[in-house]
Image (cartoon, rainbow, N blue to C red):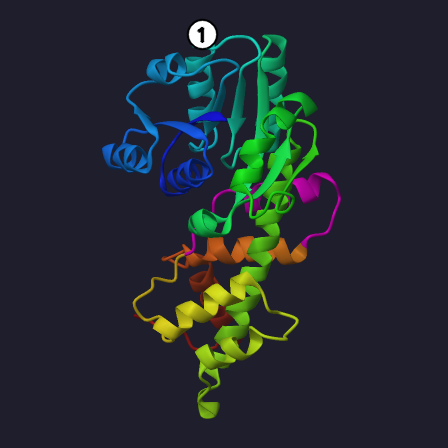
Amino acid sequence: MELAIIGLGKMGGNMAERLLRAGHRVLGLDPNQESLSRLAAAGGKACTSVAEVVKSMSGPRHVWLMIPAGDPVDAMIAQLLPMLSPGDCIIDGGNSNYKDSQRRAASLAAKGFHYVDCGTSGGVWGLANGYSLMIGGAKEPVERLRPIFESLAPGKNEGWGHVGPSGAGHFTKMIHNGIEYGMMQAFAEGFAIMHKKKELNLDLAQVAQVWQVGSVVRSWLLDLTADALKQDQKLESIAPYVSDSGEGRWTVAEAIDLDVAAPVITLSLQARLRSRDGESYSDRMLAVMRNAFGGHGMQKH
């Protein structure tokens, strides 16, 4: 099957290579020449413009976007539409907000185009292990794309699914990432407590290794943690600053809108935000108030 991928970053490039290994024809577009060279070396067609991508494909065309969520997706769709033909399909494999995906699907359907939202998980390990794909959209284009999904997933009938109508794929991925926040925070806090218990002189890499087999907390996330601890247990070279992709925020907002209590996910998001507060003004304010009403001492720089 033929597929164009716009956005050949680490993940998009790995997806392209996995598809090429499965015998698909893959075209690619990216501003980074190194990414294009990698695609060409793997047997794909490197394009230098959106127009070249579209002209090089036979219909019905399938164009997979792996670009940042928000305005860049809308801008790329607007650029593609005049060149595409009715029946062609745009797949958004990035981390778009599901409400944007619903809007885009409705707008494109009115013009005769298909839009599929595909929540994609697997990160840099997807090339070797396959990707978990949560797919939203109409049945026809999803079925048409089945060979692509089967090749990208860990197995032909596992790790991927058509989870619902337009927006369902990105909604499911949003919740997936929210759960991921909570799991990561729990592991981080547990290992921090063990690290602090100096008198036991715990080998955290060993503990993680023990948990990897038979434990109820065993997981791929624990496997990655164990590998990291083997390299460096003190983590002194790592800045205590944790980024977020935005999907944790959307998950918390959705929980509030639906009147669903989600304290673990919410607190894990707050912990990430807290990690970026180099000034810690609120903590300074707490110290001032504690001193004011109780006369407790304050530490000063």
179 and 268: which is toward the camera: 179
Q: Residue at x 48, y 74 (%)?
A: 192
In the rendered structure, does residue 274 fall within the stretch colored magenta? no
Vertical relation: 109 (above or below) 192: above
The residue carrying pointer 1 sits among few (fewer than 14), some (14 to 19) or many (20 or more) residues within 10 Å by Cα, namely: few
Residue 271: x %, y % from top left: 51, 58
Residue holding disc 1: 82
266 and 119: which is toward the camera: 119
SS under mark 1: helix
Q: Residue furthest front?
A: 23
Q: Is residue 143 left or right of residue 64?
A: right
273 and 160: which is toward the camera: 160
Q: Residue at x 56, y 55 (%)?
A: 181
Query: Magenta part of the protein: which range?
Result: 242-262
In the rendered structure, does residue 246 fall within the stretch colored magenta? yes
Q: Residue furthest right?
A: 259
Instruction: Indicate the quadrant where residue 171 lies.
Output: top right
Q: Residue at x 44, y 77 (%)?
A: 205
Q: Is residue 89 left or right of residue 238?
A: right
Q: Is residue 126 left or right of residue 13?
A: right
Residue 152: x %, y % from top left: 52, 40
